[in-house]
Image (cartoon, rainbow, N blue to C red):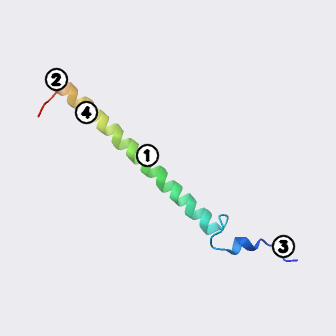
Amino acid sequence: MGGGDLNLKKSWHPQTLRNVEKVWKAEQKHEAERKKIEELQRELREERAREERHSGGESVEG
């Protein structure tokens, strides 16, 4: 008779539109954060290389 999946009406069901959207947004946020970290690491490597070239390759002891 009914034919519908009653689980889709449950708030915890993984295929509800709200939960699918929540997961998608979390994945997008995670990906953006990963890209930001990669960019910061790249900038840090470039800055260190620039400092090393500037100091003539000498190690700086403090």
- Numbered tag placed on residue 3 in the rendering: 3
Q: Look at the image and tell me in which quarter the N terminus lies.
A: bottom right
How crowded pointer 3 is (Cα within 10 Å; few <14, some 14-19, many 20+) is rated as: few
Q: Are marks 1 and 2 in contact (CB under 8 Å)?
A: no
Q: Image point 60% across, 66% down: which residue?
A: 19
Q: Look at the image and tell me in which quarter the C terminus lies.
A: top left
Residue 49 position in % (x across, y down): 26, 29
Q: Distance between the residues labelled 4 and 2?
A: 13 Å
- Residue carrying label 2: 58
- Numbered tag placed on residue 54 in the rendering: none
Q: What residue type is labelled 3?
A: Gly
Q: Which amino acid does label 4 sit on?
A: Arg
Q: What element carries label 3?
A: loop
Residue 51 position in % (x across, y down): 21, 31
- Residue carrying label 4: 48
- Residue carrying label 1: 35
Q: In this view, does 14 lie above or below 11?
A: above
For the residue pair 55 and 7, the one nearer the viewer reads as: 7
